[in-house]
Image (cartoon, rainbow, N blue to C red):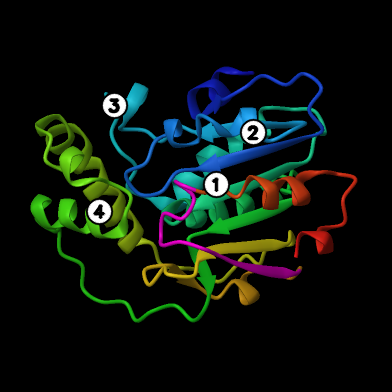
């Protein structure tokens, strides 16, 4: 791996004989560690988790403020992996949108992904844009608890409030500053995955964002369905080069 790839991408398990790669994009406030177990659970797939600036081992860096620029930087790192292994992208919630911009850049580079998995996101018209105001840390912490991604004890921890909440708030500001461009249209297929109890799923007109196919999967759970039940079997069926994507239905 080159320096750029090492900075942006954490390889969860090294697989020299891998048949495919999966690059995973964390949610708002998330870090690469969210996907630390995925590499051991997916067979013949080399899993990379994206390391966003401003958190974990990159805590000393400024957090990102431009979502399109973030996606382009990640795409350049993915392209630097080299070789011809098919690469798919999996993004959860905010990560699905970062993955979208990464996919656009990869297609621009002639290294388009095999598939984009948009988790915690569903095909629907974009919601009306409203004015954005930086929320109070207390309200952000309470919202995280309601979404199911953070327990109350962790949200009350002073370390969490001092180091983690600021970049969660920053991710929210970056997301709300994103203009949601409908172009360029993707050429790769898109698969959306969201929980049947998720009333907070990201809404995005995925059918308009790709010239290829769109598959939708509703799974049991809320916005963080993948914490107790990661969709390994579903992903495996799509990522196995010998399988028919229709078989993942």
Tell me which numbered mark, 3 or 4, is placed earlier along the sequence: 3
Quadrant of the rendering where the C terminus is positioned: bottom right
Q: Nearer the viewer, residue 131 or 205?
A: 205
Q: Is residue 18 magenta?
A: no
Residue at mark 4: 144
Q: CA distance from mark 3 to mark 4?
A: 21 Å
Tell me which numbered mark, 4 or 2, is placed earlier along the sequence: 2
Which secondary structure, mark 3? loop
Q: Nearer the viewer, mark 4 or mark 2?
A: 2
Quadrant of the rendering where the N terminus is positioned: top right
> In the rendered view, does 195 fall on the left or right side of 178?
right
Q: Measuring from the top left, give residue 241's x and y in whole percent.
A: 86, 44
Tell me which numbered mark, 4 or 1, is placed earlier along the sequence: 4
Instruction: Establish if 184 lies above or below 20.
Output: below
Q: Nearer the viewer, mark 4 or mark 1?
A: 1
Tell me which numbered mark, 2 or 3, is placed earlier along the sequence: 2
Which secondary structure, mark 2? helix
Which secondary structure, mark 1? loop
């Amino acid at each position: 791996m080159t320096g750029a790839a090492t900075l942006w991408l954490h390889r969860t398990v090294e697989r020299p004989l891998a048949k495919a790669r999966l690059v995973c994009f964390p949610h708002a406030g998330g870090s690469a560690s969210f996907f630390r177990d995925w590499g051991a659970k997916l067979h013949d797939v080399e899993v990379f988790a994206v390391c966003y600036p401003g958190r974990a081992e990159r805590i000393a860096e400024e957090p990102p403020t431009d979502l399109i620029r973030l996606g382009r930087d990640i795409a350049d790192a993915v392209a630097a992996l080299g070789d011809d292994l098919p690469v798919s992208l999996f993004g959860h919630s905010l990560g699905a949108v970062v993955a979208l911009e990464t996919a656009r850049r990869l297609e621009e580079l002639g290294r388009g992904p095999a598939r984009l998995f948009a988790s915690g996101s569903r095909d629907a018209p974009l919601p009306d844009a409203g004015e954005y105001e930086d929320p109070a840390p207390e309200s952000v912490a309470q919202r995280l608890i309601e979404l199911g991604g953070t327990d109350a004890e962790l949200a009350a921890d002073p370390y969490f409030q001092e180091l983690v909440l600021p970049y969660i708030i920053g991710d929210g500001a970056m997301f709300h500053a994103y203009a949601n461009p409908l172009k360029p249209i993707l050429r790769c297929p898109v698969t959306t995955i969201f929980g049947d109890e998720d009333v907070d799923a990201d809404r995005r007109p995925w059918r308009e964002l790709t010239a290829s196919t769109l598959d939708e999967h509703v799974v049991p759970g809320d916005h963080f369905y993948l914490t107790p039940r990661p969709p390994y079997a579903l992903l495996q069926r799509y990522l196995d080069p010998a399988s028919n994507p229709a078989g993942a239905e």
